[in-house]
Image (cartoon, rainbow, N blue to C red):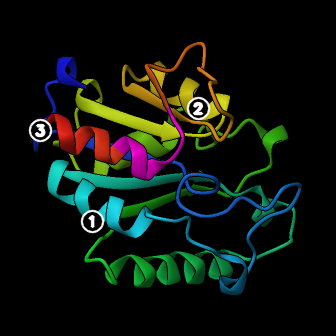
Amino acid sequence: MNNWHLDQSWTLFLDRDGVINERIMDDYVKRTDEFILLPGVARAISTANKLFSHVFVVTNQQGIGKGLMTERNLLDIHAYCSELLEVENGHIDQYYFAPDLASENSDLRKPNSGMALLAKQEFPAVDFKKSIMVGDSDSDIEFGRKLGMKTVFISYKKDFEHQTADLTCDSLESFINLMDYDN
């Protein structure tokens, strides 16, 4: 958006399931063969790499805490995601995940700020006031808002506007095309 004054000093935080890949309703992506990239995502992330200083994934993965998958499974899925993105010369700078159960109220689990604070620790130039969080759940938007980020809600429902997000788009591709057009 024109009033966001986006430049290469900005950081993009992305939720994973429902933003980058197809969400499996009432289940988890537990293996690489269950990970299906959404249309246009590889190209969108490649463009995002040119627009933003860093692109991070921040994802709650309580399937690990439930014993339905291992951390190794998740790392394999993220390596596979990176391979799929490389086809369009896109990359994720770092994947952050919260393996804990929701009931544990871990600092890492969105909407808590732990994953963003880890990113800031590893990449000190990250400025949350110059960051955008893109997600498809209320906890994603709350995560971004708590840190002072701009927030983008991905909704697949026509004519839906999220009440607290700064912007609602129908896909990551639509959002990135909008940002690229504004620059």
Magenta-colored stretch includes residue 97: no
> Disc 1, disc 2: CB below 8 Å?
no
Q: Residue at x 30, y 77 (%)?
A: 88
**Residue holding disc 1:** 46
Q: Which residues are magenta?
A: 169-175
Disc ID at residue 183:
3
User: In the figure, 28 relative to 80: above or below?
Assistant: above
Give the farthest residue toward the front.
Answer: 158
Q: Residues within 10 Å of mark 1 (few under 14, many from 20)?
A: many
The image quadrant of residue 17 is bottom right
Point out the tag, 1 or 2, that comes first from the N-terminus: 1
3 and 2 marks in contact (CB < 8 Å): no
The residue indicated by pointer 2 is 112
Question: Quadrant of the image for the C terminus?
Answer: top left
Which of these two is toward me, 54 or 155? 155
User: Looking at the picture, how far across and down is residue 140, in whole percent?
Assistant: 58, 35
The image shows residue 27, relative to residue 60, as above or below, that is below
Query: In 3D space, how far apart are the residues under numbered discs 3 and 2 (Cα atoms)?
Result: 31 Å
Q: Is residue 108 left or right of residue 22?
A: left
What residue sits 26% from the left and 43% below the top? 11
Judged from this view, the residue extending furthest toward the top is: 163
Type of the residue with mark 2: Asn
Which of the two discs, 3 and 2, labels the residue nearer the N terminus? 2
